[in-house]
Image: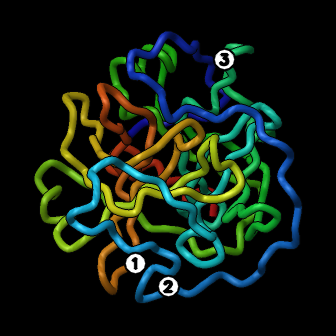
Amino acid sequence: MIWTRVRTAVLFGTVAVILQSACADPPPAVATSPVDSAAAAAPQVVPNLPAAPAPAAPAQPERVPIVADAWPWTAIGRVNLNGNGFCTGTLIGPRHVLTAAHCLYDRSLGRWRDARDVHFVAGFDSDRHHGHSAGRELLLPNQQNGFGRAALRVPTENWAIVVLQNTIPVRPLSWRPVTAENLDLMQQGARLVRAGYDQDRPYRLSADVDCEMTGFDVTGMVRHTCAATRGSAGSPLMLVSPNQEPLVVATVTGSQWGEGLAVPASAFEQTARVALTFYP
């Protein structure tokens, strides 16, 4: 995957995909509590993960609050946009945050945001967090013809990696590509979890703890049933298996025709590896 830095000039066109999970409206300022300097060890069972609904429970997607006081929740954070709203991001390296590209585009100015105006707060929970830093670089897919048009033709380019100025003392999450061929195999014995900061619960993680991937659309986007709302753009879709670490398989971008859409990890994997090498 070819990628460019944020300094590449692009134009934001009309996007056909409904960005229901777009950035949330501006929230109050984030509290700056002391940073927890110890990264949590990988647990055998994901802490604070609510039980899956009983088979007889209604099929309507549901979001529940999650206390971000242990890994992997501490690796998910709010991407604050200098008072102009927020999205969700996932720490995939010591100072590497995966999010949705459309969150980082300033529509009012017609350009990408300055990386220094992007601020990641890991495990944000009311007046607590587990580390924070402003951005240093924005790594984006190669979008020569403008982000809006590229997102229309190639929705799998709606991702970005924010390289932070400082490392975050939290263990990052790993990712794994998902394809049509391994979709069923990957989901066997696993729960799909979507966790993010939603506009109606901006100060605490909300999660759908038992949804599923239903397949891929014609553009290669992952279709899923996870509940989400505004602010949850950039949320990770995580596979949670017994006695295994959670794995990020996609990042949420929006919805279309009543289903959630997410960029599969195969789309950003190459750039993520390059970023971890050149921005350690």
Q: Amino acid at mark 3?
A: Arg
Q: Residues within 10 Å of mark 3 (few under 14, many from 20)?
A: some
State which quarter of the image contains the C terminus: bottom right
- What kind of residue is marked 1? Glu
Q: Is residue 24 left or right of residue 224?
A: right
SS of the residue at dot 1? loop
Res. 113 image quadrant: top right
Say which residue label 2 marks: 42
Determine crowd level at label 2: few under 14, some 14-19, many 20+ residues with C-alpha closer than 10 A: some
Residue 207, percent across and down?
Answer: 48, 58
Left/right placement of residue 66 relative to residue 165 reads left
Pointer 1: what residue?
245
Q: Which residue is rendered at x = 52% and y = 45% of the image?
A: 234
Viewer-proximal residue, 138 or 192?
192
**Is residue 213 found left or right of 119 in the rendered image?**
left
Q: Position of residue 15 (x, y in %)?
A: 45, 16
> To which quarter of the image does residue 24 belong?
top right
Q: How far is mark 1 from mark 3, CA to CA? A: 38 Å
